[in-house]
Amino acid sequence: MGIFERKEGVTATSWIYDTLRQDLVNGRFTAGEKLAISALKQQYGVGLSPLREALNRLSAYGLLIQENQRGFRVPRLARDELDDIADMRCALEGMALERAIQRGDAEWESELLAAAHRLKRADEAPEMAEAWERLHTQFHRTLVSPCGSPWLLRFIEQLHDQFDRYRRLAPGDPEVRRVLDAQHGELVDLALARDVKAARALMDDHIKRSYEVALGSFARKL
Amino acid sequence: MGIFERKEGVTATSWIYDTLRQDLVNGRFTAGEKLAISALKQQYGVGLSPLREALNRLSAYGLLIQENQRGFRVPRLARDELDDIADMRCALEGMALERAIQRGDAEWESELLAAAHRLKRADEAPEMAEAWERLHTQFHRTLVSPCGSPWLLRFIEQLHDQFDRYRRLAPGDPEVRRVLDAQHGELVDLALARDVKAARALMDDHIKRSYEVALGSFARKL
DNA sequence: CTAGTCCAAATAATCGATTTTTTATAGAAA
DNA sequence: TTTCTATAAAAAATCGATTATTTGGACTAG
């Protein structure tokens, strides 16, 4: 008998955690909204205990705010916070990229090229926005992955999720988008050329342009 | 009638979360140990639901590891990870200190002096190790508090907890300890003098010396 | 012996119901 | 009108019990 692929241990808690995390990052909840737990229970078809465990994890992660005796809320969007997040992304991703370029091996180069290629394909297919988001996240993750610091990678991931709460709400300008897409390719070139200095500068610029886009998420409210 | 101080909303979950966080940082559990949930339930006298919610928060925070269907474990201590944590502390606390010095106002100066004074008092009273830890944490928190970035402060706090898992296990050398204590005062002097460069250098040295101490937590095992 | 299989005990995860606290509303007093 | 109090409805937190999964032998075949 062959070895059967064991159905990986997906508990109700881990499933609802992943699902809610996605939905929060994608802005399916209104910022500032208070979560109606029993409604969520119905909508997602999970029990109360797994749901509450997931909500507790999400608030420790920073995608929810918990107030004792009064449940869970979706954090508000604030310009100050977006500034902070973008600023931290520059600092931490810059640091990580620098280390990744110094330490990344040949296998990394291959993965990076692959990730960039997949992303580029998705750039040109505007109908699969969902998939693009996944590939975009994966590209940035790959870029910094060999930096050597698990904690740095953890923080960066957290910041990405926070940043995307803003960016994915914002209306996209095709012209800006074209520039951002092109920068992904340039980042690969500089990484492969091991040009730390230029790569950091470009990453900085990339984040700052994305930040300008993300700022648009406030447009409708002002 | 006067306004009565409302007993703050301490839920069973928030209480057991705080308590376990303390106990984990203080090394009351063996690294690598698997947590026996029903035993914890007895020991701490809390129900299963609040306990599990707290454990979920703690694993999202990084003080526990959760594996689906097989509960919660205390993370192992590894030299590589201590290196990473110390390294990140240098990078992030250095950055935060620099910003704090540039932005801290007169009120900050006062709080910093106060925090340093309280800590110094505790330095000389070796019987209150418990209190010293609290004041030490508070001192470092105060030092970087006006850096302007909530996310940076959040990451630093997380790293402190991780670092302390190692440091508080390590045997203390009175001579090294004397130097570290003195550095707290020097950090205040440099901060008040707004000497960014020197303060960063000293913070770096302070963390590196603490790292050397923390390394001692492996001594008994090698 | 060494794997491999089966089962029972232990443990993790989940459910349904109960208790506690907050929130909203209506009436009373200032 | 405004502020306070009482209370009912809603929601959050917690409990006790049930279900599902893993773990650790004991047994069996190779």
Image: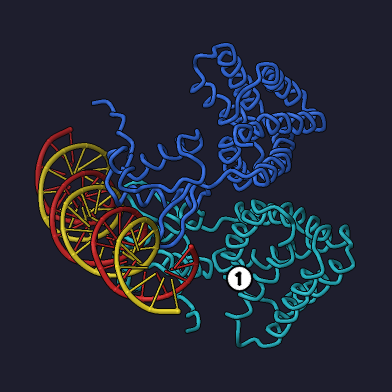
Chain colours: A blue, B cyan, C yellow, D red
- Write down the residue under mark 1: B170
Number of callouts: 1
Write down the quadrant of residue B12 in the picture: bottom left
Query: Chain letter of disc 1?
Result: B
- Answer yes or no: is residue B39 visible: no
Classify mark 1: helix, strand or loop: loop
Give the image location of residue B190, x and y in percent.
86, 67
Q: Is residue A101 left or right of residue B197?
A: left
Q: Residue at x 67, y 29 (%)?
A: A213
Q: A17 and B124: which one is in front?
A: A17
Image quadrant where one finds the C terminus of chain B: bottom right
Q: Is residue A91 above or below residue B123?
A: above
- Mark 1: amino acid: Ala
Write down the quadrant of residue B100 in the picture: bottom right
Give the image location of residue B99, x and y in percent.
79, 55
Give the image location of residue B32, x and y in percent.
45, 59
Q: Is residue B197 above or below residue A88?
A: below
- Answer yes or no: is residue A39 visible: yes
Q: Residue at x 74, y 60 (%)?
A: B146
